[in-house]
Image: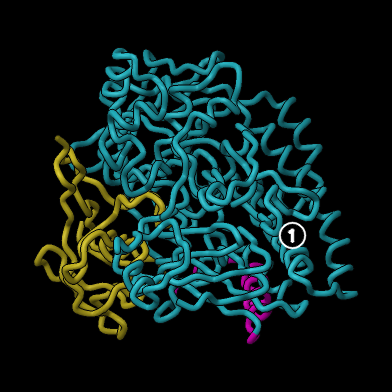
Amino acid sequence: MNNSSDNRIGRSPPDSEKSDERVSFQFNGQEIIGYAGESVAAALIAAGILTNRTSPTGMPRGYYCGMGVCWECIVRINGKHTQRACMQLLESGMIVETVESAKKP
Amino acid sequence: MTIEEVDVAVIGAGAAGLSAAGEAAKLGARVALVDDNHYPGGQYFRQPSPQNYKHQNSTSSKDTERFSALLADIDTTLVDYRPGATVWDINAPLTLGLADGKRSCRIRASAIVIAAGARDYVVPFPGWTLPGVITAGGLQNLIKGMGVVPATPVVVAGSGPLILVAAANLVSAGIDVAAVVEATNRPWGIVREAGKLIRDRSNLQLAIKYLRRLHKANIPVLRGYGVIAANGSVCLKSVDIAPINRDGKFERSKTRQITAKTMVIGMGLTPSLELARLIGVDEISLPLRGGSNIVTDEKLMTSVQGVFAAGDGASIGGVELSLVEGRIAGIHAAIHAGMSVSKQAESTLSRDLSKHKSLCKFRTGLEQIFRNNVDWTDLLTPETIICRCEDVTLDELNQCKAKGWTSPLQLKAATRIGMGRCQGRNCLGTLAALTANPTSDAETYRAMPRTRQPARPILLSDLLHEKLADPELPNDPHLPRRRD
């Protein structure tokens, strides 16, 4: 599911020509279009990406509490570790990557 | 390091915090309004991100008006609004430590209003860590704040009024809701009795409006059911639901499977108590209100002199109660800080105190309607993750218990439960339930791990910058001592 027009409410999808606030960013090397100022988490979900990190036993994890409490949606942004995707605002050219937790002994 | 001095420090810029800051400023108090979010409004008044939003959101015109009024009240030089700042410490004498990702600093206040808000009360079940399983609060933020809707079909499950709101918002956004699964199934007589407590008809009408919207869209509402598992390997594919019997146990033989890419789970709210705990306020266990709540007097002061608490961050009661409590706490905090009370503040207080009473009755009514005896630990299987951060399963906890490590602190030391980035916010409630003292809630909570600084994860570089700004940092127990 990569069609952004399906999961944004009442707003032209980012690939429409009417939009002038769209910005491009990278997720694990893939170029994605989102809106400047929305949360990184929202931009990822809108692009159909649900897994932001892996847990200590290698399980996929993503957006859960949406308000900065659970730290499940953390990603690496521009090389900076452990950023809550739900609390970080999207900027043009951001390099976003999945975070792998240290393996459980 | 210079410690900033203010009259009143307000923690949280949601409904309660904004009204507290506004009222305190009206009495002439210098206020620091500190918030973790980038925008004011908290969860309820969460606004579409301002740079670019044009989508019609679900905010009613009444709420838009109320929110504008709140913002107008803090739009004064007396209020220093500091968004994007995490309060990581609070200690005597009424000093906050806050970090913003660049540096840490201290604010000393004559009075503090804790309006830290609430978060979703969570219960673990098999598959609850799968991407696609999100909390009711998470859904609201996605829709209200970002105008993004989750993958469909969606199952909305849990208990309480919030899942009704979540489902109704999804329907309004044109989203395919496969089912609403509500654990409580109270006989109508009890619902009617509880309804009598609800004087405020506008709230009742709102609930009826939501139910009508679901009915009109043909969304099945299953009462007396609960989700027993979320299925999928990399993301959610389906959910298993089962009826709940009279003893509060799940009847697994009658399990039904529903296809879903998103499950919204709402079990009610629990106050974010960590900061109040750090400074040592008295708490009370209220199982119908998300567990531990803060004890306050009629001025909304806690057991610690000069520390006030308001809104859902003190005791779960919803937005109307938060607004009222914010005003009461703001006025009393300003008075505590030495401001003299105005005629206007006096009339606000007397009006709000009567409102407070009627809203508390409303709350009791709602709590009676959604009261249930569901045994949520019945959902746990040996493989179920209890601590999401550290991937601790029930089986690991049971193995420790078999070795005689039975107390919460022993289990924490042995498995790292509660030691991850969420600092136990997702698992300590479950750990308390699994280690509960059958006769005393107070004993159960006393045995739980303490809250420590930093109250939320912050960057070490923030602390380093604080230290560099003043090598002669005063006796601060939370920073490393120089060894010279």
Q: Position of residue B30 (x, y in %)?
A: 67, 78
Q: Residue shown at 57%/36% (left/top)?
A: B291
Query: In the image shown, does B214 or A68 lie closer to the viewer?
Result: A68
User: For the view shown, which residue lies furthest in the front direction?
Assistant: B484
The residue range painted magenta reads B55-77
Q: Position of residue B319 (x, y in %)?
A: 65, 56
Residue B142 appears left or right of B114: left
Q: Residue shown at 73%/54% (left/top)?
A: B301
Q: Residue shown at 64%/26% (left/top)?
A: B186
Chain of the residue under the numbered disc 1 shown in the image: B
Residue A50 appears left or right of B19: left
Quadrant where the image shows the C terminus of chain B: bottom left
Residue under circle 1?
Answer: B324
Q: Position of residue B116 (x, y in %)?
A: 56, 57
> What chain is the cyan one?
B
Does any portion of residue B159 appear in the rendered image? yes
Up/down of B405 relative to B262, above or below:
above
Up/down of B77 relative to B313, above or below:
below
Query: In the image shown, does B427 or B261 lie closer to the viewer?
Result: B427
Q: Residue shown at 37%/58% (left/top)?
A: B149
> What chain is the yellow one?
A
Q: Main secondary structure of the magenta part?
A: helix
